Image (cartoon, rainbow, N blue to C red):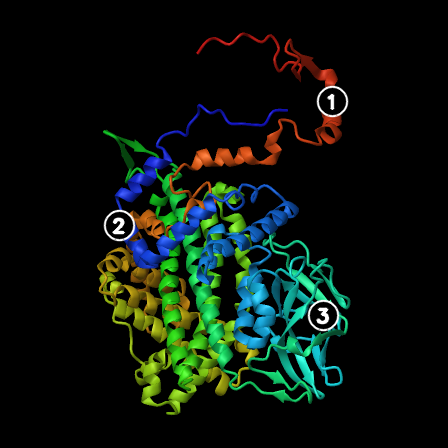
Amino acid sequence: MSPTCFPTHLRPSEPQGVDLLAQERQHASFDSKALCERIYGADYLAKKKELLDILVNDPVLSDKSHRYFHGRDVRFKKAMQAASRIAELIKKHNWSYEDVLLVDLLFDEAGPFRLHRSMFMPTLEGQATEEQQELFLKPAQRYEIIGCYGQTELSHGSNVRGLETTATYDTSTETFDLHSPTLTASKWWIGGLGKTATHAIVMARLVTNGKDHGPHPFCVQIRDLKTHEPLPGITVGDIGPKFGFSTVDNGFILFDHLRIPHISLLARFSQVDKRTGEYITPPNAKLSYGTMVFVRANIVMESRYVIARAATVAVRYSSIRSQGSDAANPKTITVGNSTKTVETPVLDYTMQQYRLLPIIAQAYACHFTGQAMHKMYYDNQEHMARGDFSYLADLHASSSGLKSLTTTMAVAAIEESRRACGGHGYLLSSGLGQFYQDYLPKATWEGDNYLLTQQTTRYLLKTYRNLRAGKMSEKAKQVNFSARYISDYLASPQSRCTVASLEDWLNPETLLSIFKNRVAFMIEQAVHAIDVDKTSWNDMLVEVYRISRAHCQLIMVSNFFQGVFGSNDEILRTSLADVALLYALTTLEQEAADVLTSGFVSPAQASLLKKQVILTLKRVRPNAVALVDAFDFPDYLLNSALGASDGRVYERLTQMAEQEPLNHVSVVDGYDDYFKPLIHAGNANWHVDAQGIARLRGYDANPKTPSKL
């Protein structure tokens, strides 16, 4: 019953992954460490190293070996231990909010305290009064209470106005009656609610003096601080197994006329007079849009990490995994003084490049767009502080569409990267399967990816109508990205693409003009369909999605080009010029139907585009490993046999197989009960040799002693 172990004297066949990755790095045309510093900044990298050293040497947080081998019960208990340990370290090291975000990124496991830090405390910081912050926020910061954020209900997610939970104010008791009037009013999917939280921010319809004022946030205690038992009037629990996120206790809760004090209503903006029940309106409803823009800017930046991480695993493995030989271009490798021809790494095949190199480009496009969004957010905050809300609508609309586009891209990138790893990509030890499972909800939360695009397109159609009617000032056009490109189109709707050769497809201005014309034409056609042909909004929803997607692809190309070609930084230009062009070219090729429909690009020009895509792939290929190295994902984070930085793919695969609990014994538990009766029914056909080993008769008839090798 000994454990199963691989022979220790065996090593992978030549060439070794270590040598293949080393050669890839030597052949790069730029220094990946220099690019890494341009992406993150020296201070960030120093802080990451400091925090990583703490994590990899911590007795609780250093070990991730259980993640691929155990069920939810074990993983959730381990996650509870990790959450508690991180809370201890926050106090011990006095970590800032940014430090904790970086720790969460490196530890890479959503835990029971995820919503406590990401939603509960930020909501209290943004919407609670000083008195409420003293009561709720300070204990939360000390982890003396644990919170979550309860908005989504069993039958209402994106339609916040349709929430059913009510909070009715009673002036006689100066309390709110918190109630779930129907089964579908159950709060559902609330992270940390199932078994962890003591308190919740509950979004409920505020009713006072007989009037419904719509959803408002309430801070509600849900469990006894002494026993952790649910309070009377509350039904609460875990919603059950999910596609991923096993270490988060997503929960449900129902309220049966639960009385909560007046101070529960977060009152920084909206208030209810304690004595009269009079509702006091918030000063400016637009202020909340700024927060949404910030959240979505962070989602875009997170998409950068997600896409880059998937690409890191697949590109490194594709540089090592060798299949067949390319007779026209045989692969050689030099180790020491010896050079020899070897099998071809799959990344040398154009099809593999076509699948993976655009994913690298998408990661960098998200990086520059996330940076631009953060800058626009802070610029807009300054304008709003002066009472100028002119930037907000365009920024909010674009951020909605970008959340949809970038998370959709990220989900697709993980899956395409996994498939590009062949059969081994299906192993959890690839580092991609569980990663995909846990990221997938991003396409739904913080706004469903299809519904959000309606916000973007509604704004673009309105902007087009205002420009055509002459209702927008020249100043407004200059500060509004969307208005500028729509205005340019209206001034010259019959213009055509000037591409005449393969090289013309490498002109950034030409590429931008195609993206701009494409989306402006789509907007024009949609306005005509709605205003002239009287097509219903419902019948336009597919085109509405396409318009938002086109607009946001334009934004990403524009930001990528500005970050590279508009920069004086030689490192950025040298390392990323072809990558930026690849993003634009492959996006246009992918969206060829829309590009050709307007007539701006001809079929002959589109044919040249396809050829230039292949040529650009060839230029990017030598830098593929260096480009993913520049994102600087430590092996501790990747937790991948295929994507580790040292290239020891096959050694790690076998080591991780040994960790499988089924391999801890040679005969599996349950054999005697289920398999043995079937197999032993045929014992009349056995031959038992001198060593006591049973085989089928005839299998070892007249065995001969093997000759020495």
Residue 482 left/right relative to 104: left
Q: Residue at x 31, y 39 (%)?
A: 22
Mark toward the viewer: 1 or 2? 2
Q: Are marks 1 and 2 in contact (CB under 8 Å)?
A: no
Position of the C terminus by quadrant? top left
Q: Are marks 3 and 2 in contact (CB under 8 Å)?
A: no
Q: Residue at x 71, y 74 (%)?
A: 260
Q: Mark 3 belongs to which amino acid?
A: Thr
Give the residue pinned by disc 1.
680
The location of residue 551, given as percent across then percent down, is: 41, 73
Mark toward the viewer: 3 or 1? 3
Give the residue pinned by disc 3.
184
Task: Mark 1: give few (<14), some (14-19) or many (20+) Cα within 10 Å.
Answer: few
Q: Residue at x 54, y 41 (%)?
A: 65
658, above or below 371, in the image: above
Q: Mark 1 belongs to which amino acid?
A: His
The location of residue 319, given as percent across then percent down, is: 36, 42
On the question of residue 427 being in view, the answer is no
What's the CA distance linking mark 1 and mark 2? 64 Å
Give the residue pinned by disc 2.
31
Task: Mark 3: give few (<14), some (14-19) or many (20+) Cα within 10 Å.
Answer: some
Q: Mark 2 belongs to which amino acid?
A: Asp
What's the CA distance linking mark 3 and mark 2? 56 Å
Q: Under tag 1, what secondary structure?
A: helix
Which of the 4 image quarters holds residue 219?
bottom right
Closer to us: 668 or 412: 668
The first of marks 1 and 2 along the sequence is 2
Residue 67 left/right relative to 490: right
Residue 681 left/right relative to 439: right
494, above or below 597, in the image: below
